[in-house]
Amino acid sequence: VYQIYPKSFYDTNGDGLGDLNGVTEKLDYIRELGADYIWLTPFFVSPQKDNGYDVEDYYNIDPRYGTMEDFEELSREAQKRGIKLMLDMVFNHTSSNHEWFQKALAGDERYKNYYIFKKGKEDGSAPTNWESKFGGSAWEYVPEMDEYYLHLFHVKQPDLNWDNPKVRKEVQKVVRFWMSKGVKGFRFDVVNLISKDKFEDDFEGDCRRFYTDGPNIHQYLKELNAESFGQDAEIITVGEMSSTSMENCFGYAGEDSHELSMVFSFHHLKVDFMGNEKWVLVPTDFQKLKDILFSWQIGMAKNHAWNAVFWCNHDQPRPVSRFGDEGKYWKKSAKMLATIIHGLRGTPYIYQGEEIGMTNTDFTDISQFRDVESLNHYEILQQKGLSKEDAFRIIQIHSRDNGRTPMQWNGENHGGFTKGMPWIGVNENYSKVNAQSQLHDETSIFNYYKKLVALRKELDIIAYGDIRPLDVRHPSIIAYERIYGEEKMLVVCNFYKTEVVWDSGMDLKGFETLLGNYSEQKIEESKISLKPYEAMMLYRKR
Ligand code: TEU
Ligand code: CA
């Protein structure tokens, strides 16, 4: 699956915002890469407080992105190229501009029950101490009602009340509407947060346990499945699971559980956090990364459940900057990271620009950032006593805007993204990092991704094989084996720039190289010598 953040993909009318026609124009590029699906992040009518994750009208397209005709054309053109579309459904919350919420505020009881309104505590303070993921209290006071409403995200993103059957019916209707437009895939935003448990203060944890993987979540997903996408066997679905547990994912993405096709979980990306705390600077814990990645690989396989596998999306920094090397080993490390993901058991997701090794932003001032989460936390960090410089450094490293700067198409002005002024700055490195220069270069990152995608389609072992991690305690190597009947595939990667000789402990005779980021692989008996960020996929028929 290739993920597109339309706002930053390609602008066709010079207003500085990417649009649906921009996606249509670039379909051949995506076909060249080999993706089967395009996941489009939300383009529905929205005040854009959270770049479209605040939906005002689920049935219409925001004029900034285009029209329904544009969407239909995109859909037709994609189909011609064998590409299916996956839409992003944001059902944990709506925009506060949504008609339902406006009616609720106007005192309509029916619509008030669509949301989560509660009385404050005796002293008038918020109903619970829950915090919004974007900073501050998760409750907003409405003086006219003398009540608070819940917003786990932005204050303009009130949470829907899924315990109300009318809400569940509305949501099913939305999915069926897009199915009727021929849509064959859905991604469900933070969908494991829809079933809230107890509305209580949390003095032990960070409140997540009261609304994450809640008591009715599996029932609600089964119902949504039965009433909408489950009626079309061709449709694939993925749920974005915030701070979930693996046990719950056995259900969400279980072969026979009739919930979703697969899940995004994020534990393997919290390896440069302090626990759940993102707004700190700590080095990547490589051991933890491997432990989490592999425990999910094995646990999900054992329980017949399916993972989405990925390094990045529109909420994450760029992987080559985060886990690789932007400098001397830019190409090598980007390919190494790709190798790890694309050999795994699960459906790989490529986020726009990842396939050409796009890097984090080069912003030097807070005014260049756009994301509400970054801007809020920049203030919060200073309120906690950090200097402007220290707060800024943390934002630079962790900001979601790192993944949101425009796609770098070529060496022209603004990287060829727009003829106007881009809504967010293009990384100045576009003259070096751009798609055009990579398309016809056999050694490019793009062509390496293309080969990875092709291999997965060619060799069943990649899609269906079992997985066995190797030498998990090794300080710099990440390696695993895939097994499928008599066949074997070996993925071996040096996660660092120091050369290392790795003893696989097995006889490597008969293995051929499927792909590698160096022209030759040095393999002797059981040992492999790996150069900086070297990665390889080896294969033996029997
Ligand atoms: O993100 C869910 C989420 O909790 C995090 O990824 C969040 O963006 C943040 O990084 C926590 O530090 C989804 C969408 O992908 C995101 O873009 C939306 O802002 C969010 O839901 C609300 O709809
Ligand atoms: Ca535009």
Image (cartoon, helix red, strand yellow):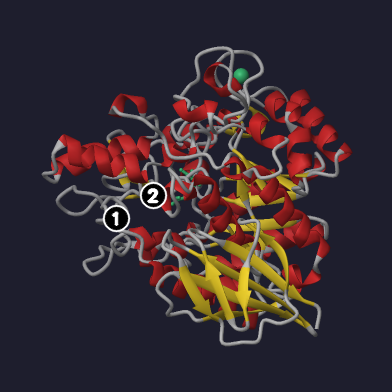
Q: Which mark is residue 130?
A: 1
Classify mark 1 as within 8 Å of ligand 1 or not, answering yes or no: no
Q: Nearer the viewer, residue 12 or 58?
A: 12
Residue 57 lies, in percent from the top left, at: 60, 33
Instruction: Please state if 25 lies on the left or on the right of 359 as rendered.
Output: right
Tell me the quarter of the image containing the C terminus.
Answer: bottom right
In the displayed structure, 14 sits above or below 309; it is: above
In the displayed structure, 198 sits above or below 363; it is: below
Residue under numbered circle 2: 152
The answer to whether one can see residue 141 in this image is no
Residue furthest out toward the left: 385
Q: Which mark is residue 289?
A: none
Residue 402 lies, in percent from the top left, at: 43, 39
Specify the quarter for ligand 2: top right
Residue shown at the point (47%, 79%) measured from the top left: 472
Q: Are marks 2 and 1 in contact (CB under 8 Å)?
A: yes
Residue shown at the point (73%, 76%) measured from the top left: 511
Residue 129 lies, in percent from the top left, at: 24, 56
Residue shown at the point (43%, 69%) measured from the top left: 476
